[in-house]
Amino acid sequence: MSINSIWVYAEGSDVPTALTLEMLTKARELSSDVCAIVGGDAAAMAGALGAHGVSKVYATGDLGGSLPGIPVASALAALIDGGTSPDAIFFGQTYEARDVASRLSVMLDQPLVTNNTDARVDGDTLVCDEPVFGGTKTLSTAFRNEGVKLALFRPKSFEPAETGGGAAEVVSIDVPESGEAKIVARHVEERSGPQLDVAPIVVAGGRGMGSVENFAMVEELSSLLNAAPGASRAIVDAGWVPYAYQVGQTGKVVKPDVYIACGISGATQHLVGMKGSKTIIAINKDEEAPIFGVADLGIVGDINKVMPALIEAIKSAS
Amino acid sequence: MKVAVCVKQIPDPAVPGELDPSTNTLNRDDKLILDESDSFGVELALQLVEAAGGGSVTLVSMAPRSEVSGLRTALAMGADDAVLVSDDALAGTDALGTAKVLGAALGRVEPDLILAGVESSDGYTGTVPEQIAGVMGIASVTFAKKIEASDGMLSIQRQTDDGYDEVTCPMPALVSVTGGVVEPRYPSFKGIMAAKKKPVDQVGIADLGIDASAVGFAGSRQETVAVVDAEAREAGEIVIDEGEGFQRIADFLAELKVI
């Protein structure tokens, strides 16, 4: 068996997410036959998916408020058990796709390989690369299973590119199991200013900020630089800022032009989410902090002295 | 209400991790501790049982060498007992195999609700909780930041990219919880003393009816074929602040044409 066909689990509402288009681009590089799967209605996305090389979209149609894990996985398992199977399926490392991939892995009794940032075909199997230890090492994992290979990819791993193809054909698929977990209401927390995952400048704070009150300095510096404020998992866990601020393994992966890390030590979990930034500036009192290992400019000093002075300097410069 | 909590015992995250060169898996030879991200599940379980007016909290863990240090920490917080799966055959087990083992162990506990962290702090595949629910054939909700239980139903706030969803789900169910949802209690001295006497049921895979070929390196059907150093960033400039650190940053931002 070789890797001749790849399906990509496509996410998005009206337009596919950036991660979906990234994975499609990679899938096309590895295989000539690329299809998409949509857990929901695919009509709005068929054009954009086609433009990124998708010939066919398998769509479940509206899931009636069910969390997608069980219904989408059961639809895919039925399709695959019925003989329509790709050699590999790509999923994003996202809330929904992780659930679908996990359920499908159990239904098909197939392994999955997570947190990948690259993939290649080696002989008759798929090999995936995962950054480990804060991205200082890359682990390559080869699938050794018979049957479909389930791989999950981290955001911002590939550059999306269009092929200029026409709209993809939408094929409805049956959903054998609907699942009992139902969404009864949705709440959107509005955030003003630049979006964290696309902002050209990010200013992020960590436990070294000392207190939730001090996080205001991160917000102020962000607004002065027209940057998006971010946070390490430590202070999200501590309840200082909402989860939407989190940069890291869990949370957002960011690759801005400038990343300013304030009081962030640089745990593996955080480094993986921001190491791809073009320029990194770090302020931390601990000279040994791992963040200095990736910083282009590191200031070893007290946040409470450096940040207010920096904020004043920028104010008087503008 | 009977709540089970999946807890992972991991190498101390403060110590730089390393791979075992012979197997390319994470070295877990040193003492293991409770994964901090699992302490939220333990706290939530204790609160839910209190709110329900009674019940029990059982920990379920899989670890090498009959490791109990992390379990004792969670028992000291107030969990009642624990099931520990430890078996030499489990070395190298992948996410799906881990879910099969934990699913079998949880099946013996017969809980109304199973809580787990969203992902561990050492392996962070983030798939095991949902896979456990799949193995057990029960409903599940991942990324929960708030849970209420009444009349056999769960009301959950589930984290999303731009806010949260309100989700309902019947029990039995598995729910994975994000960090920061609750403030995990510190074990009291009394709790620590009591934890030493709490029962830890130690089982092997044969006790769970799992064949050795389905787990471990053999059962994982994936193989680490290479570990290489990633391209390192060029070493940057490190400045010890003596009052001028802010100016160096401002100058650098000006060089970058940010200001």
Image: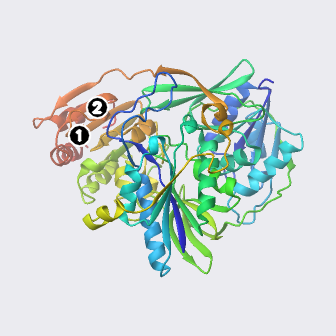
Q: What is the x, y in percent for residue A123? A: 72, 17
Front-lying residue, A240 or B142: B142
Give the quarter of the figure containing the C terminus of chain A.
top left
Closer-to-camera residue (B187/A266): B187
Q: Crowding at label 2, few (<14), some or many (≥20) Cα neighbours within 10 Å?
A: many
Tell me where residue B141 appears, x and y as whole percent: 60, 61
In the rendered picture of this protein, how many numbered marks are placed on residues? 2
Q: CA distance from mark 1 to mark 2?
A: 8 Å
Which residue carries the number 2 mark?
Answer: A292
Q: Do the residues indicated by labels 1 and 2 lie within the same chain of the protein?
A: yes
A81 to the left or right of B169:
right
- Give the residue number, with chain letter if any, for mark 1: A284
In the displayed structure image, the side of residue B33 where residue B82 appears, left or right: right
* B130 relative position to A62: left or right: left
Question: Could you say which disc has been placed on residue B51 in the image?
Answer: none
Kind of residue at disc 1 = Asn
Kindly check if marks 1 and 2 are in contact, taking CB atoms under 8 A apart as contact.
yes
Residue shown at 28%/44% (left/top)?
Answer: A262
